[in-house]
Structure formats: C-alpha cells, structure tokens
Amino acid sequence: MFFSFSKVLSPSAPINPVDKMQDFVISISKYARKSNPNFIVIPQNGEELAFTKADVSKKINANYLKAIDGFGIEELFYNETYKPNEYRIENLRKLKNQKPVFVSEYVTDDKLIPETIEKNSAEGFISFARNKDNYHYSIIPSKINNENQDNIEKLNQAKNFLYLINNSNYSSKKEFLTAIANTNYDVVFIDLFFNKAPFSSEEIKSIQTKANGSKRLIIAYMNIGAAEKYRYYWQKHWTINDPSWLKKKYDGYENEVWVEYWNQEWQDIIYGNDDSYTRKVIDAGFDGVYLDNVEAYYFLTND
C-alpha cells in the first residue's frame, strides 16, 4: 500500500502520527541493539518516514536513517501488471545510496517476472517477484536472482532475498526449515512463529547457512502498526476501542486492527521488556526484524 502523508495533518495537531512512528521505529532499534549491536531493522513501505516530517521535499531524518538498515517496498513497478509508481521511485532514488532497497513485486503473468528483475536492477534495487499463487508469500520460487556463494553478514551485501512469512504450506517446522536450508537465498524473511510456536535459536541457526555453505541473514516479520488477532498477545474480549488503542478496522484483513501505536500498552507488547515481541525475536537468534504497517500513520487519519 502507498500514499502521501503531506496533507494529512495540520501543523497544530497535538499528536503527530508521523513523529510518533519515527520515534517508535527508532526506539525498537535502540532496544534491540542493546542486546545485539548488529541487529537489523527494515521498515516495510512508509519510506517517507526517512524524511523530516515525512515530507520528501525536506531533509533526510538522520536519526531515523541511523535506526534502520534498509527499506522494504511492495509493488513498486508491478501490481498485477506494469504500474510504476513514479513518485515512490523518485523518493527511493534519493535513499538508495543511504540504505539498500528490497522490493517485492506482484505479477499475475509469470512472463513478467524477468521484467520485474530488470526494472529494479536498473535502479539498484533488490527484487523478489511473486505470482498469483504466491500472493500471500507462502512459496519458495525455484529460481534465485543473482545467486552467489558470498558470505552475507551485513544487509548491504545481499544480492537477493526470499519473502516467506506464510508457512501454512508446510506440515511441520522441520519441513519448513529444511525447505529454507536447501536454498541459497542471501536474506530470508519469515515469521517468528510456526503454528503459534516460536522458533528456537537452534532452529534459526540451522538456516543461517545457505545450502552452498555460505552465511546468510534470517529476518523476523513483526507487525507494529496493526494488532493481529491470531497472535499470543490478543485477548478474546478485545474489540475496536477496547482497549482504547485498538482504533480501526483494517480493510481487506479481517484478523488485523489498526492501533494507536504510540500508546504505552501497545509499545510494551512490541518492545522494551522480556515478554515483548522484539525480545522473543532476539532470543530466537534472528538477525533482525522486518517491520510491517509502519504506514499506520496514514490509515489512522484517513478513511
């Protein structure tokens, strides 16, 4: 999803959701890096947050940029067919020399996959293409773009990535982990949980090596802008506005609710304590987090 935030709020607004999301991402990063100085943070979409007040005509927000390691982007050039978002492309051109850009494209015709690679490569972006059978990120494509034998110890060394946050196609943890272990992807995005059971540090370690013996990075998906009804933290009695920070239905995703993410109760769920989501990610030995729905700053203020 994408939108521009430049006209959402008046300057007199008492709470600025942009500032709050920038602060949230920065705080998650600082917390995680106390345990692991090399911990990777990648926000998905909301790339405008890299600029002061999310205004792309202003300077880059140095504190935000320092807190993250790359940008995750969905449907930049392709959404079913070729539909380039020139506004976003231009903004990412301003950022790509600062941090690597990872783009997930969606096509309904597999013949377009080579084009998705070509368009992104020309801009210096790292791309992953999914088709209609893989809309929900549940399949491992057989062909890897820029497959290599390099040791990948930093995000900016990566030449490809696998986006596999839906493990419903696999009957067991072992089957899922084996499928990943048998690939040579440089970076892999997966969920922290398999059937509500978190992966252990031993399990994550088992896939931090490519099939060819080289090192790679394993990144955990974490939704920070919307609460998910299937997560361990969700209480059966919760509904919109109860608790008060559950603010808005998430259209198209019935099991998610947009949250007032600057509320302390929500932030405590996400980071800052031993029972937080981020702590579980750290304890499981992941190399970093992939932060979804950072663009909640837009959806909370627009119908």
Image (tube, rainbow, N blue to C red):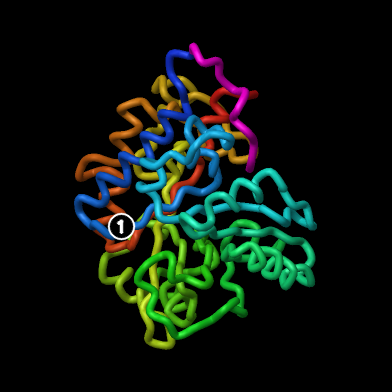
Q: Residue 9 colored magenta?
A: yes
In which quadrant of the rendered view does residue 103 lie?
A: bottom right
* Spot occupied by residue 143 in the image (x, y as percentages of width and height): 62, 79
Residue drawn at 35 percent across, 74 percent down: 208
Crowd rating for badge 1 (residues with CA inside 10 Å; few <14, some 14–19, many 20+): many
Residue drawn at 53 percent across, 63 percent down: 163
Residue drawn at 51 percent across, 41 percent down: 293
Question: Would you say 202 lies left or right of 131 here?
Answer: left
In which quadrant of the rendered view does residue 230 lie?
A: top left
Question: Would you say 185 lies left or right of 133 here?
Answer: left
Which is nearer the eye, 234 or 274? 274
* Spot occupied by residue 17 in the image (x, y as percentages of width and height): 47, 26
Is residue 85 placed above or below 184 in the rendered structure? above
Is residue 169 placed above or below 302 in the rendered structure? below
Q: Residue 192 colored magenta?
A: no
Which is nearer the eye, 213 or 182? 213
Which is nearer the eye, 72 or 227? 72
Label 1, on which residue? 39
Question: Would you say 231 lies left or right of 302 here?
Answer: left
Is residue 56 placed above or below 211 in the rendered structure? above
In which quadrant of the rendered view does residue 149 lie?
A: bottom left
| Label 1 SS | loop
Kindly report the secondary structure that dominates the magenta region of the rendered protein.
Answer: loop
Q: Residue furthest bottom?
A: 212
**Which stretch did the figure color magenta?**
1-12
Residue drawn at 45 percent across, 68 percent down: 187
* Spot occupied by residue 221 in the image (x, y as percentages of width and height): 44, 54
Question: Would you say 41 lies left or right of 139 here?
Answer: left
* Spot occupied by residue 52 in the image (x, y as percentages of width and height): 47, 33
* Quarter of the rendering occupied by the N terminus: top right
Report how many numbered discs are placed on residues in the image.
Answer: 1
Q: Amino acid at mark 1?
A: Phe
